[in-house]
Image: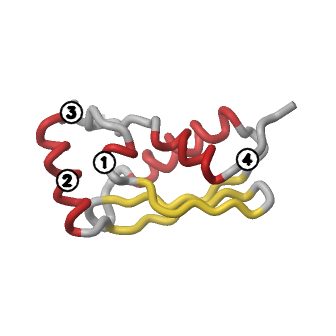
Amino acid sequence: MSQEVSTERIAEIINRIEHPEIAATFHELGMLGNISNQEGRISVEIRVPFPNIPIKDYLAGMVEAAIKKEFPDVTVSFTFSVMSDEVRARFLGMARQRWKGEI
């Protein structure tokens, strides 16, 4: 029997993902926004520090792969929003401290 797709479970999955360039999870970096679930159609908001970051598609692919590993039949779509000044400052501080390098 497969596990029920809940927004809480989707958040748990996403929040465990580590950023590809920073040794910190999406949760630690404040990157997860709203999640909605409409009958197996998952919509995920990813918060980014600046508009038009070059790895948006890469981040979305990471998130989608992690969700589909557990829930292969769901459809996942994404929106991107810019972090608040406070969250961006925390993100950039962690990026300076935990930078792993380019993907």
Distance from label 4 to label 3 (Cα)? 34 Å
Task: Give the residue at mark 4.
Answer: 5
Mark linked to residue 79: none
Position of residue 20 in the picture relative to residue 46 (left or right):
left
Callout 2 amino acid: Arg
Task: Give the residue at mark 3.
Answer: 101
- At mark 2, the secondary structure is helix
Return the residue found at the far right: 1
Distance from label 2 to label 4 (Cα)? 31 Å
Residue 96 lies, with reference to residue 47, above or below; the image says above
Residue occupying image coordinates x 23% and y 51%: 91
* Crowd tier of the residue under label 2, counting other residues whose Cα lies within 10 Å: few below 14, some 14–19, many 20 or above: some
Distance from label 3 to label 1 (Cα)? 16 Å
- At mark 1, the secondary structure is helix
Q: Earlier in the sequence, mark 2 or mark 1?
A: 1
Which tag is nearer the camera, tag 3 or tag 1? Answer: 1
Callout 1 amino acid: Leu
Which tag is nearer the camera, tag 4 or tag 3? Answer: 4
Callout 4 amino acid: Val
Residue 70 lies, with reference to residue 92, above or below; the image says above
Residue occupying image coordinates x 72% and y 39%: 71
Q: Earlier in the sequence, mark 3 or mark 2?
A: 2
Q: Quadrant of residue 97?
A: top left
Position of residue 41 in the picture relative to residue 46 (left or right):
right
Q: Quadrant of residue 103?
A: top left
Task: Give the residue at mark 1.
Answer: 29
- At mark 3, the secondary structure is loop
Position of residue 83 in the picture relative to residue 43 (left or right):
left
